[in-house]
Each structure stands twice: as C-alpha cells, then as structure tokens.
Image (cartoon, helix red, strand yellow):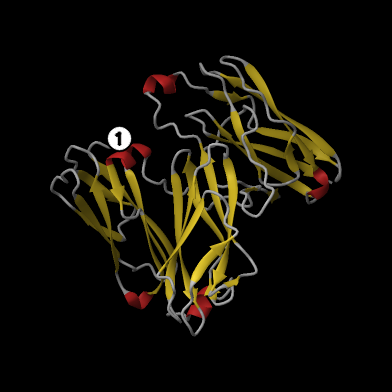
Amino acid sequence: MKLFFLPFFFAGALLTCGNRSVANSGPNEIFTAPVEEMAAAIEAESPAEEAQEVISWDKTIHDFGDVSVADGPLACSFTLTNNGKEPIAIFEVVSSCGCTDVQWTREPILSGKSGRIAATYKNEDGPMPFDKTLTVYISGVKRPVVLRLRGVVHEKKKSLNQLYGAQKLGALGLKSRQLKTGNLKQGLSASESVTVANLGKTPLQVSWSKVSGNLSLKVEPNPIPAGSTATLTCTVSSNPDLYGRNIYRATPVLNGQTAEKPLEITAWTQENFSDLSQAERDKAALPFFENSTFNFGIKNKGEKVEVLFLCTNKGQAPFHIYKADTESPALTLAEMPRPIAAQQKGSVRFTLDTSSLDKGENVVMVSLTTNSPLRPLVNLFVAGEIR
C-alpha cells in the first residue's frame, strides 16, 4: 500500500474562509509546499502562551549533540525568570522516564528573580538517539511547560566528517539542510537549534543571503574555529497572512563565498487561541465531517477523481479553513471553501490526478488549518486503488 502522510497534529474535522496563503515570487519570499512525511512522534509543545507572559526561559530544548557511551551521564540545566509581579513556585517536574534525574529550585521565585532545573540523562541505554521530556508545573501558569533533552549516543566517538560531512556546504558541515521548528502560533515565534561543524582548517565566518521574510539565523560561536562545532539557531516569526506548512530559506555565505544550496526551515503556523475566554471558546466554530476518509474505489491510472467532504459546523461562530496542505501534489484543492455559518452544512472539494500515483492501493492525506480552538488542525484521507 502506498501511504502519503502529513506531520503531527490533531485528527478530526474541517472547512473554511478566504485564501490566507501567500504565493512566492522571489528569493526572499516564503515558500509553501506539501508535506513529505508523518513525524515519528508528536513533537513536544513549546511553553504555553500564558506561561510566556509570566516566565521566560534561557532555553526549552537542550541538545547534547553527538556523544558516546563512554561519556557517561549527561548533565544540563534550564533557567527560568519570573516576569510577573507575584512570587511563583515550581510545584513539580515530571520526567518522561526513569533514565533522567531532575532537581529544581524549591523556594519561591520572587519577581525578577530566576530559578533553575537541573537534569541528568543517565546514558545507560546504549547507542541510539534519545529525546526525553521534563513536564514542569508552575504556580500561576495554567498549562505545564515541556522541556526537552535530546542527542545521539554512539558506540564510539566519530570524526566531524563522519558526523557532519553528508550535507556539507563548502567547509560548513551539516547533518541535514532541512530543519523544522514545529508548531508556530500566530503572534509568536518558533525556533530550532542544531549543531553544525567547521570541517575546514581555518576559522569559518558564517553570514546569510537570500533570507526569507520572518526568518532569522544565528551561529554561536561565529566564526567557528577550525575543526570545531557551533550551534545554529533558526527562528521563524509568525506572519498573519500565512497558515499551515511553509518553507523558509536562507543561503549561507562562508568567509564571503555564497554557498550553492540554501537551508530550508519548515514551520507549521496555527491560529493562536490563548486570548480567548472560556465563554468565547464555548461559542467558537466546531466542525464535524460526515466521513474522515473519501474512498474513490478502483480507478485506472490517469483518471481524475472529484473528492468531496461534507461538514457541519455545530459551533456558534462561522467556521473557516485558512489553509489546506496535501502530502501529494496529485491531490489539489478545487477552490477555497466559503465559511460555514453556525449550525449550517458545507463542503470542501479536491481534485485527485491519479496519473502521478503508483499502481495499487493509495492513501493521500490532507491537513486543514482552521479557526476552531478544539480542532485547529484536521486530517482527512483520500483512499482507493489505482490499476
């Protein structure tokens, strides 16, 4: 069976409003594109919006990078600062497994002061990637904050060329030119940090050209010493006209020489519902689809299929679809659906061109970014057999 999947999100329903996506016309534009894979696991959320008003963090992800079994336990810490007017306290920090020990500031954290969470990954599981979470419960913050510890453990230490040579741009070594910041809420920003390497014999000064709007990049240290690593942080700020999956690009300039290929940073933008009261949430749009899968049966390769999903908005506000992202270019949105009024029915239509699909069973997934607080991202499926 041929499967096409979109990355992490809530399964459910959908439909919507005028076209909110932006076309691309130049090197500084943001590119929209279909999704190529389903994430292996749901990505840990960045701190809740209400938490960001009360506290700030020096980081929410610690990447140990490439380490070896012989390195033994791996320690790191996270610092939080109380930005509010009242004291706060860390009630509890829950590790995702017994392989991570954690300690934290027990006394109240006064306004303007900082607290600390110290974590140690035991590194006893042998050579493998790891991605552990710490769920932090804080007074005055409605939702817990999720911190992450990640890295890759190797049996033996490897050279920089072995670790970062696969996707190098000149002397700049990378594990991949494709990065992901994860979910991005409107009005906020999302970041991803990765380790890069200077594979050359002289210091490497990194700057950037042809940078997409709303994207910023930082390399520390810069210049990167010869034969050493650095941290590359990519930050995407939201754009009120962009929803769904978007690709941002930047081309490295290394010691004054522009690289041949750009980096690509993917961010998935959703609506920000943090300012809604409970009453507003109760009155918001609420879509229900008659079926989450459209089965087109058996078709000859090359046939075109008209795909229809029927939806009822059981909420008290109009239901909008901001963006429809399909995994395969074979499935295209026929037209942006109109808003569905409260307690009314509507539909969303796609066209499937089977000429680019493999023979046999196929499942194509589409994800809709919506204005529903309960269903901000909806997954629908188109399935059938091509002969």
Q: In this orientation, which residue lies closer to the viewer: 145 or 39?
A: 145
Q: Position of residue 300 (x, y in %)?
A: 86, 43
Residue visible at 40% across and 26% down?
276
Q: Position of residue 19 (x, y in %)?
A: 65, 32
| Residue 366 visible in rendering | no
Q: Position of residue 264 (x, y in %)?
A: 58, 58
Q: In this orientation, which residue lies closer to the viewer: 213 or 197?
A: 213
Residue visible at 20% across and 51% down?
114
Judged left or right of residue 215, residue 45 is left
Residue under pointer 1? 142
Q: Is residue 276 above or below residue 207?
A: above
Secondary structure, mark 1, is: loop
Residue flagged by tag 1: what amino acid is it?
A: Lys
Report which quarter residue 367 is drawn in: top right
Q: Is residue 333 above or below residue 157?
A: above
Q: In this orientation, which residue lies closer to the viewer: 377 or 387?
A: 377
**Going by the picture, which residue comes out furthest to the top?**
343
Callout 1: 10 Å neighbours few (<14), some, many (20+)? few
Report which quarter residue 129 is drawn in: bottom left
Q: In this orientation, which residue lies closer to the viewer: 323 or 225?
A: 225
**Going by the picture, which residue comes out furthest to the bottom?**
201
> How many numbered discs?
1
Q: Is residue 366 above or below residue 372?
A: below
Judged left or right of residue 310, residue 39 is left
**Going by the picture, which residue comes out furthest to the front?**
256
Judged left or right of residue 26, residue 297 is right
Q: Position of residue 16 (x, y in %)?
A: 62, 27
Q: Is residue 2 above or below residue 164?
A: above
Report which quarter residue 291 is drawn in: top right
Residue visible at 70% across and 47% down?
328
| Residue 122 visible in rendering | yes
